[in-house]
Image (cartoon, helix red, strand yellow):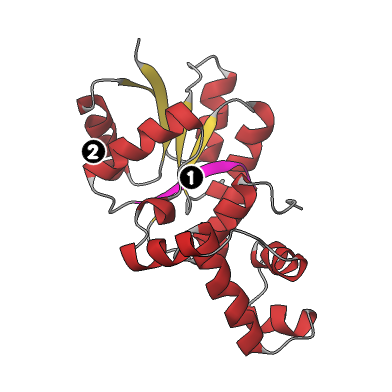
């Protein structure tokens, strides 16, 4: 039985192309397409099939990705939400994760990685590209380190999942920016990630932070 999947994106060419690509994977059935969150709401409320996985563009008119993800997360808590991004900032993507997305994918993602990501999302309910693309040197280093996260690092993680800059986090924690950089690099190694977004996703996944 094919997995029902939906796409909401305001670029029609991308929307149709992605739909065709998903169908080519043979295990997905694109049951719902919409150009923005409001249209998606209307279609679902009018009885459109409910997807198991929903791919959500971040930047859309009328009702953007964050608003759409929040609504879907509340209305359809079992639906797996995936953020689609071009060149959005870390903070925007983190906001998508906080809104209920279990993964974020760049629109330039290779079809093979997209297929792999969707398989993990369908099976495990979560996908973090950082964990998949971690470089070998950092992986070796992280395996040598005990995965112990201090209270200070936990507090830093909580702030890292907000819209605060690293400089603002340093001021809030009454620490130097150099110390904050040290926390960040240490946690990158311990959680096997390469970016702030990846760090936030792993922290949320492992229950190390509380979303507000």
Q: Dot 2: within a 10 Å radius of its alpha carbon, few (fewer than 14), some, or many (20 or more) residues?
A: few
Q: Residue at x 43, y 53 (%)?
A: 131
Within-10-Å neighbours for mark 1: few <14, some 14–19, many 20+: many
Name the dominant secondary structure of the magenta segment.
strand
Which span is picked out in magenta? 99-106
Name the front one of labels 2 and 1. 1
Q: Closest to the observer: 164 or 158?
A: 158
Q: Residue furthest left?
A: 24
Examine the image and state in which quarter residue 92 appears. Answer: bottom right
Which mark, by number, is residue 17?
A: 2
Task: Return the residue at label 1.
Answer: 103
> Which one is in front, 139 or 10?
139
Query: Can you give x and y, in whole percent of width and height, for residue 175 in the image?
Result: 74, 86
**CB atoms of marks 2 and 1 within 8 Å:** no
Residue ID at (42%, 39%): 35
**Numbered disc 2: secondary structure:** helix
Q: Position of residue 95 (x, y in %)?
A: 61, 55
């Amino acid at each position: 039985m094919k997995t029902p999947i939906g796409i909401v994106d305001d670029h029609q060419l991308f929307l149709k192309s992605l739909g065709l690509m998903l169908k080519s994977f043979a295990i997905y059935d694109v049951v719902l397409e919409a150009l923005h969150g409001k249209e998606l709401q209307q279609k679902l409320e009018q009885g459109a099939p409910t997807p198991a996985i929903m791919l959500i563009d971040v930047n859309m008119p009328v009702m953007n990705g964050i608003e759409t993800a929040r609504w879907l997360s509340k209305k359809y808590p079992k639906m797996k939400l995936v953020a689609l991004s071009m060149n959005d900032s870390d903070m925007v993507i983190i906001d998508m994760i906080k809104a209920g997305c279990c993964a974020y994918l760049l629109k330039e993602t290779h079809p093979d990685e997209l297929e792999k990501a969707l398989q993990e999302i369908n099976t495990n309910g979560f996908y973090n590209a950082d964990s998949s693309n971690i470089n070998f040197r950092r992986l070796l280093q992280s395996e040598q380190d005990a995965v112990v996260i201090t209270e200070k690092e936990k507090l830093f993680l909580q702030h890292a999942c907000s819209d605060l800059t690293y400089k603002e986090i340093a001021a809030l924690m009454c620490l130097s920016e150099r110390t904050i950089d040290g926390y960040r690099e240490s946690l990158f190694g311990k959680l096997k990630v390469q970016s702030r977004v990846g760090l936030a996703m792993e922290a949320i996944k492992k229950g190390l932070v509380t979303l507000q």
